[in-house]
Amino acid sequence: MSVLTRNEAQTRAKLLDVHSYTVDLDLTTGEETFDSRTVIRFTTRTTGDTFVEIKPETLRSLSLDGHPLDPGRLDGNRYPLDGLTPGAHDLTVDATMHYSRTGEGMHRFTDPADGETYVYTQLFLDDVQRVFAAFDQPDLKSVFHITVTAPPTWTVLGNGTATQATEGHWTIAPTPPISTYLVAIAAGPWHSITTHHAGIPFGIHCRRSLAPHLDTDADEILDITRACYDRYHQKFDEPYPFDSYDQAFVPEFNAGAMENPGLVTFRDEFIYRSAVTDTERQTRAMVIAHEMAHMWFGDLVTLTWWDDIWLNESFAEYMGYQTLTEATRFTDTWTDFAVARKGWGYDADQRPTTHPVAPDAVPDTASALLNFDGISYAKGASALRQLVAWLGEKDFLAGINTHFTRHKFANATLADFIDNLAATTDRDVHTWATAWLRTTGIDTLTAHTENTDQTWDLTVDHDGTRPHRITVGTYDHSLDTLTGAEQLILRDRFELDIPQKTPTTRPGNRPDLVVINDNDLTYAKIRLDPHSWNTALTHLSGIPDGLTRALIWNTARDLVRDGLLHPTVHLTAARTHLPYETDLALVQGVLGFATTHIADRYLTPEDRPTALTTITALCRDLLRRTEGLTARDWEQHHTTNPDPGLRLTAVRHFIDAATQPDTIQDWLNDGTVPGGPELDPELRWRILTRLAVLGATDEATITRELDHDPSATGQEGAARCRAALPTPEAKQAAWHAMFTDDTLSNYLFTATAQGFWQPEQTELLHPYTSRYFPDAIALAARRGPAIAEAAGRHAFPAHAIDPRTVTLAEQALANPALTPALRRKLTDQTDDLRRALAVRNAH
């Protein structure tokens, strides 16, 4: 299949204006295919040749202005339209289309819990052609008129309000001009909760088997939705630009969510079947806020081409966190951003595949798909946060509103955006944009302090090219008179522009702790002065502000990854300070890094058992801290009291780090952890997966558990457990399912891959390391980008940390047959292997 190049898109945009699509979809024709009929009304400005995209099972017929065309001229996914004359044209395309099992195009899912079937579209970035014929590029916006024929028991949702004219026949209200990738349909026997807010119909929807769980959380989801909607209307001059706001939680979704105007689709793991922490609820709320921001950033004003994807994602990321902080009970979201997101950006920015936030050129759609990463999201959002700190929020919002007014229901570029910002301020935004958005890599800011008689000096070395406006926080030791514990109290905070022209002189003795980039307002690696670093290591839990603690934990993370801090020092700090940590996001983030990076990758196999013992001991400390929780605490786990979530986090990580099966087997047998919580499905499958890794369970036990929980997540849990069993037969069966059978859905493929590779099973898995590369290359070619990305992310032998694996990966990367999606993941994974080897060799 041909990918669309930027040059082709520009040529077609000069030739065509697309006015409307009339799309009729028939979802009643069988389990494998559906019918799609499209009429595209467009005009051409001059005489010329172009093409329309479609990926059909069968192309039944086409006609242009009433004249039949030969379906046999379809070339891959392109049908040529030659010799178009100036003026108006109607193109009619009638085709049979494939349902997808990989989350691309029109995905079809049958719920194993009750046998009900659901379909939904995911048309991002160039997958609309899997559903209907289109001039598939973001700057050819059009009005969409869509009708759907569905089974009579189904409800159909779309970008506009949907009405059922006769049984099974639905009409979606015409859209305003939107891009092809934003069209959305979701159909099935949904469980729906509807309301109105500010004159707009709101709805939330999920599959029927999840109805009790949606009902439990409906008030919270709708409250967050209303609060964000109202806050955006305070920020933005342009009102919400669509006629309704539906949020559908759909199965086997490849992303966190998708910003389809009027019909946002979310992965339905956000409908919680099991206990979750308040930080996880905050994450769901942030995704709701992020996607709603897209109604303006991306949907109302859309990028002209994919090099400006940051204009969508960076803004939605920034606005999501900021708006959640301002409008909801989740007031510490930037701490979670620092812990859960910023490291994603830092990691991506240090790999060979790094790119500017706003790349100079993205040559084609295949390349564009690779840029949805930690740079476009986390780094871009960090850059915008720094821009607001430098520009001021008033001028920033004024520039945004100018941008909306000038380009609503149209397209815009980076140059347009910068011009609109510059029009509202006397600051040199163009120079700022060049330094921040057109460059790659991470600056490093290193603090140096020096005491004099009555003052102290601060100098910040700047390794990099970007200007930074930072806050410096200074802290002193203080004794807590109630507990007798030594704390750190804030002495002062002051702003500093980097690069520094001269040392900053402050009155008094040197503080015990000097934190540059306190409040985490810029994007840079931070290196504390030696005196401050020693204070931080020994008194981290005594720092009063969670965001400051997050910055220091991120500094420790960076030092470990750069080979400048022994991984066991990080573990010791975690063991020392996490039992006293009050911010749950920090506990989750630090424990996650300790498990998945330090224990699994950065320490040698010989040192790993000791690291796991440290982690389980830490988790026992956290469990002791949270003893005595009542049943009401567990029932109301959305309370602001962090203890239930803290205990749940400790239980999860204790399970994952267990080196002996006895304790967790007792929990599984009893159906509860002593002192709580009772084991819900997530915890039962988690324990069973770890028992499988340790060789302490079997196929019969997995089957019995699946009989008890036959849901979709139960199916995934069973696939993960079976792949984790340490037997040759289990590994061969899992490998066949992933790389030969080709029937696994995207979620079942991921679950199988997650279970397959285990650090405890190195010898058993050794033969599969060399098999992985040719098998993954062939799989990616057969099954497309979504499975290629999953194969590169989850099925890669990430724990085979040795020069042999690096050599095999480098040989694979030399293969010209690699698909772009797999090449990107292999490049990143190989770089991570080299980094892990370097960390081990550094100590």
Image (cartoon, grey):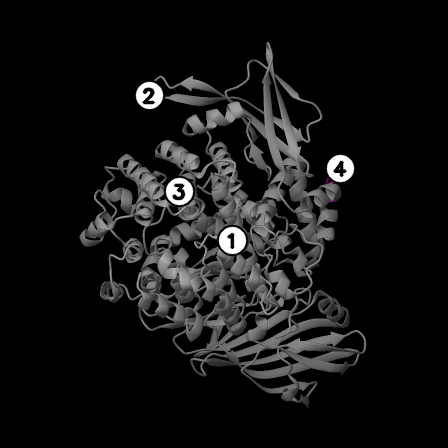
Q: Which of marks 3 and 1 is nearer the N terminus?
A: 1
Foreground pick, 161 / 754: 754
Q: Mark 1 points at which residue?
A: 198
Q: Is residue 424 magenta?
A: yes
Q: Which residue lies furthest to the front in this view?
A: 804
- Corner quadrant of residue 177: bottom right
Q: Which of marks 3 and 4 is nearer the N terminus?
A: 4
Q: Mark 3 points at which residue?
A: 591
Query: What's under tag 4, amino acid-wise?
Result: Asp
Q: How far apart are marks 1 and 2 (CA)?
A: 50 Å
Foreground pick, 732 / 793: 732
Determine whether the residue tagged by mark 3 lies in a helix, strand or loop.
helix
Mark 1, other Cα within 10 Å: few <14 / some 14–19 / many ≥20: few
Q: Is residue 184 magenta?
A: no
Q: Distance between the residues labelled 3 and 4?
A: 45 Å
Q: Distance between the residues labelled 2 and 3?
A: 27 Å
Q: Mark 4 points at which residue?
A: 426
- Residue segment shown in magenta: 422-428
Residue 206 shows in this picture: no
Query: What's under tag 3, amino acid-wise?
Result: Leu
Cβ atoms at labels 2 and 3 below 8 Å apart: no
Foreground pick, 204 / 194: 204
Q: Mark 2 points at which residue?
A: 483
Determine whether the residue tagged by mark 2 lies in a helix, strand or loop.
loop
Query: What's under tag 1, amino acid-wise?
Result: Ala
The percent position of residue 236, horizontal first and vertical second, equals: 61, 48
Camera-nearest label, 4 or 2: 2
The percent position of residue 705, horizontal first and vertical second, equals: 25, 63
771 left or right, relative to 317: left
